[in-house]
Amino acid sequence: MRHAIFPVLVVLGFAASAFAQESPSRLAVDFTGGYAAFVDESAIGHFTLGGGVRWQLTPKISVGPDFVFMRGPGEDRDIYLTGKVIVDFMPNRLVSPFVVADGGAMFHGDQYFNAPASWGKEGAVSAGGGVRINVSPRISIAPEFRIGWEPHFRIGAMVIWRP
């Protein structure tokens, strides 16, 4: 009887280790893109592109740095360096709503009258939400909407990779 149990335990051990390799890590790498509009006398549209890394603190809460580059009309450029927190309400589901908030610094650059570009820095925050949709155990897409300061709104999507 003992000799029959040993092969079963070996097979179960290999199956458990194979399953462990397939489960996503607590690390997430985000790639973002979309559209932002700064609310001024009229909306000033910007193309956005960015990325970040997050670590899961709990199954629902993850935190990490975030980088977003925004390209507006002419020489209008904005760079956001923030810390981001995401609360994923149903992390074990195929589709899950989430909320996101971030805070940090915005660097704004513009060029006026053929002079060298000038850059300024100020605080920045944003908050919003979206829906995460798992495409595979390691890849998700997440359309989102945010409102932030300097007054703007963002519509975009994240592609999330869990190595």
Image (tube, rainbow, N blue to C red):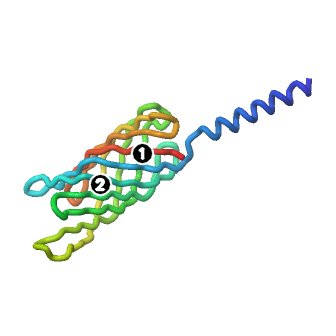
Q: Residue furthest left?
A: 41
What's the residue type where badge 2 is placed? Ser
At x 47%, y 43%, the residue is 60
Kindly identify which residue carries mark 1: 87
Residue 110 percent location from the top left of the image: 19, 68
- The circle on residue 126 is 2
Residue 160 falls left or right of residue 115: right
What's the residue type where badge 1 is placed? Val
Quadrant of the snapshot with the N terminus: top right
Residue 89 falls left or right of residue 104: right
Residue 90 percent location from the top left of the image: 45, 35
Quadrant housing residue 52: bottom left
Element at label 1: strand
Structural crowding at the residue carrying mark 2, measured as other residues with C-alpha within 10 Å and reported as few (<14), some (14–19) or many (≥20): many
Using the image, determine if residue 23 lies above or below residue 116. above
At x 33%, y 57%, the residue is 68
At x 24%, y 52%, the residue is 47
